[in-house]
Amino acid sequence: AQKITQTQPGMFVQEKEAVTLDCTYDTSDPSYGLFWYKQPSSGEMIFLIYQGSYDQQNATEGRYSLNFQKARKSANLVISASQLGDSAMYFCAMRRGTGGFKTIFGAGTRLFVKA
Amino acid sequence: NAGVTQTPKFQVLKTGQSMTLQCAQDMNHNSMYWYRQDPGMGLRLIYYSASEGTTDKGEVPNGYNVSRLNKREFSLRLESAAPSQTSVYFCASSGGGLPQFFGPGTRLTVL
């Protein structure tokens, strides 16, 4: 069965520092996709970054990068130069296969950025 | 572009009442989804529609029905609401499987 685990219920980071949010996954499918979403206090879900299981390089999007370690089944999100606006819930998610539709989400990590 | 829109934003029901949550997207996406979000549990897939004319069950379909009205619209119906269905409901859409874009959510309370 597929599973996403986010072991950090809450994290604190000082403004302008980098922070890593952990995500491990379990799947027997050779093809899958990994996503990170941000949910600010306003409630909307914002797509941040995507990594395909066959992608050779780690995905990057601005200040976000995904540290993909396939053998360890981990897909950690790294946020560089944290900003106060980064304070939010962050969800790791996995979609099965190319074009697969069922996506499972982790329980989330709440990030607090301190001034 | 409005992206994904949902109505209503808030709703309070009594146990046993029915209601339909509406969702529409203007991104010409083939696939649409309904999720529920409960505290501490992340999002769970209720139903999805891979393309117009098809619908399939997700992780937690019991107590819900869906209709893919056309390519733009995907509705979620609660026939007889129960307190266990108190949650925040999100609609999402995607094209080619990548990635899913979410609506603003509907906060539903069942008394």
Image: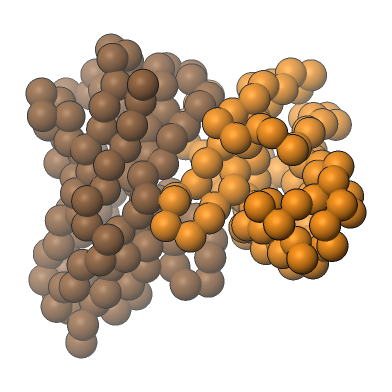
Residue at image position (32%, 14%) is A29
Looking at the picture, the colour scheme in use is by chain
Residue A112 location, x and y as percent?
26, 74
The quadrant in which residue B32 appears is top right
Residue B15 visible in the picture? yes
Chain letter, brown in picture: A
Q: Which of B68 and A106 is in front in this view?
A: A106
Residue at image position (52%, 41%) is B44
Q: Quadrant of the C terminus of chain B?
A: bottom right
Residue B9 visible in the picture? no
Q: Chain B colour?
A: orange
Q: Which of B79 and A32 is in front in this view?
A: B79
The answer to whether A103 is drawn above or below residue A115 in the figure is: above
The answer to whether B29 is drawn above or below residue A107 in the figure is: above
Residue B8 location, x and y as percent?
79, 61
The answer to whether A6 is drawn above or below residue A83 in the figure is: above
